[in-house]
Amino acid sequence: MAHTQTLLEKRERLLGPGNPLFYEKPVHLVRGEGVWLFDADGQRYLDCYNNVPCVGHCHPRVVDRLCQQAKLLNTHTRYLHENILDYAEKLLSKFDASLDRVMLACTGSEANELALRVARFNTGGEGVICTNATYHGNTRAVAQLNSIFEPFEGYGDDIRMVPWPDAYRAPDGLQGEALADAYAGKVREAIESFDQAGIRFAGMIVCPIFANEGLPAIPPGYMQKAIGYVRDAGGLYIADEVQAGFGRTGNWWGHQVTGVVPDILTLGKPMGAGHPISGVVARGELIDHYRKHEMYFNTFGGNPVSCAVAEAVLDVIEDERLVENAASVGRYVFDGFRGLQEKHDIIGDVRGNGLFFGIYLVTDRRRKTPAPAETKRIVNRLREKHILMSNIGEHDNVLKLRPPLCFSTDNADQLIGTLDDVLSSLQEQV
Amino acid sequence: MAHTQTLLEKRERLLGPGNPLFYEKPVHLVRGEGVWLFDADGQRYLDCYNNVPCVGHCHPRVVDRLCQQAKLLNTHTRYLHENILDYAEKLLSKFDASLDRVMLACTGSEANELALRVARFNTGGEGVICTNATYHGNTRAVAQLNSIFEPFEGYGDDIRMVPWPDAYRAPDGLQGEALADAYAGKVREAIESFDQAGIRFAGMIVCPIFANEGLPAIPPGYMQKAIGYVRDAGGLYIADEVQAGFGRTGNWWGHQVTGVVPDILTLGKPMGAGHPISGVVARGELIDHYRKHEMYFNTFGGNPVSCAVAEAVLDVIEDERLVENAASVGRYVFDGFRGLQEKHDIIGDVRGNGLFFGIYLVTDRRRKTPAPAETKRIVNRLREKHILMSNIGEHDNVLKLRPPLCFSTDNADQLIGTLDDVLSSLQEQV
């Protein structure tokens, strides 16, 4: 603990204050393996949070490919190299045939930056729609989409934020198709408002499973209708797959959950299992038109080491059947959470797809009143019991869980059992 | 060659056309070691271009640290870890004491994005000055500074481009202090024009050795005067050290060439010897003020693997005395180029610091007429003779050389001898 204090002081002195850090009592990690993380005291934690090491922490096949290629050559794409081509081919084979080009970069912010530029260039428009409780990255243009943290520059008039579709706390008690119509209508209104302001429309960018919004159950038909309006107005659908991609939802891609194929999509976090690689995948004509007019070069993007690592990640996901595992263990965990919901009133709603869950905590089930203070206590209590997760959502009251995709039913039992204990002890205290 | 054709076709099909590539006959590289690169036919090339592998291609100490840490743990900065702190401390010790905070990201574009946001937030200004023949990255906000490639969005009214200081083709035959005054006067005029337009001034961003501009000899006193105007007007000096940093100039940092300490500086390319890591170093108060108000998080930025690699790069630079090597071998190469200049009329000017050179090629020495076509031929001819370099500058007529910092006098002899041969054969042909 004295050591933790030293690290915290050093961190503030060297990196500045306000550097985001998890937990009241931060965790000092030194080692990772599979779904496990180990702290400096040798304590083991079950990682229920980290989607970046999607194949498990320090997967030997991924590390081996990294080391082999790093020993051999690491250079940029102004020379020819096979790794980027082998990877691009394998990656694109996982998508709908219409999505047949890829551009590589290093971070999710870079991918979303590029996707916005490609969309705006191709449509000649400026107006972009996002949701009112989201985050897409940290560059100036992308920060314009951040409804969770308002950028200091303020918002431009080329952004419209629409309410994310929420079947749990639906407005006016709407359900089913009427609810989908109501939310999609907000997208239509946003497009109309661009029109009225004389701002040409470029498209809509959303996480296809609305992860930052708290993983709501999406009203059936919503995406079809909303994207229908977008396309009718000449706009493009950009799916931010930085969190949702690479098997997370029990499908290869998050957009498969609703079945609406995007025009452009962005990839990041789990793409290199922690190695900085990201990408933009799109319909060929969009990328070709952009590339013909705009010089795009990214010094580290698509280098032989990054591509070797990313290819190893794809190989492991396939060979270890991690998409299937996310689907089946995901269902098991989901059922377990539903069981906890029957027992604990604080659980208002359980959402998710594959191995990505949101547990919506409420102080009052009937009124569905968000419980942010309790959520924070639970996250910290679980950390004490060596289970790592975090919280998200408009009201910070949604437990956020996205463990490595190699999560097992044994891991699930530990998670569900510990969460049960923590929720029970919380009730006793109250 | 059939294979090269296959790779080119695959590249266009998967990545789109217009992907930047070097040479009329592209090089297909498979291995790197020290200053050497090897192609698929086993042919060896002397790398006189790549600054990213600053310690030499695939340096064993860097690769070892990479592999060791990748096997152990790779996670983000929301948990405590010592690597980022050890690295930050070692890195900051290389700077003037006023530069005492660092923020880590993954690419030079991200670093310049962040630097602009930090500068604009701290000054409350929008207006930024850059030069009229530069490139600082590929995001929308940073692309506004790209005078080499005009962004499709066009330029905003918050950007002013000033002529880069050019002692070789000086206007009106000005020299010495008068020349420095003339160029610095352009900075003062730009600040005045922001004032007249009612745009609050934020600062000036330049590469401290004007690398993209063609590495001109900077008129003595220019930077002092120009930055004097910037600071008098409440603006900040951002030094883009992405190319100039980490020993390249025979100093640790490019800004040491003119001796003007920046308020903010950005690091990239050689920082991780190819591993994607970048950073913003600044006066503590600037970063602290920014961090207190703006949430900045970068998923891969500052992760334990990146920091281990970057620390190994610093250690190798120190232990192998690469800054000193850049200075001494740099002088040797420079003298060699000056020798070639006496022999070959096409060499109008030789510039550079440390192991970063620009050879300004002209068709007419007296008129100093740029020779872009000849420059291109020479670059391609040298590639045939297994020497890799490229060209830059407003007119694409400056041979650009920035070999790994472990470049030796033997390497220099090979470079100078081959360049001599190519220039001679060029003359014979003409």
Image: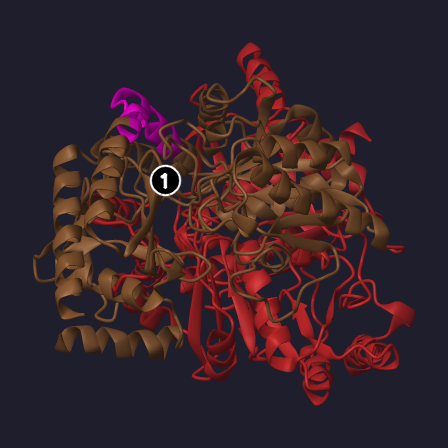
Chain colours: A brown, B red
Q: Quadrant of the C terminus of chain A?
A: bottom left
Q: Residue beneath label 1, please?
A: A352
Q: Is residue A324 left or right of residue A155?
A: left
Is A326 in the magenta? yes
In this orientation, does residue B370 appear?
yes
Q: Point out residue A197 in the picture as x, y percentages from the top left corner.
A: 84, 55
The stretch in magenta equals: A309-327
Furthest-left residue in this view: A42
Q: Point out residue B92 in the picture as x, y percentages from the top left corner.
A: 39, 73
Q: Quadrant of residue A285?
A: top right
Main SS class of the magenta portion in the image = helix
Q: Using the image as rendered, state which of residue A222 and residue B192 is in the foreground.
A: A222
In this orientation, does residue A73 appear?
no
Q: Is residue A244 left or right of residue B330?
A: left
Q: Is residue B370 left or right of residue A156?
A: right
- The vertical placement of A395 against A185, above or below, is below
Callout 1 crowding tier (Cα within 10 Å): few <14, some 14–19, many ≥20: many
Query: Mark 1 is on which residue type?
Result: Gly
Q: Quadrant of the N terminus of chain A?
A: bottom left
Q: Using the image as rendered, state which of residue B247 and residue B152 is in the foreground.
A: B152
Q: Is residue B218 left or right of residue B46?
A: right
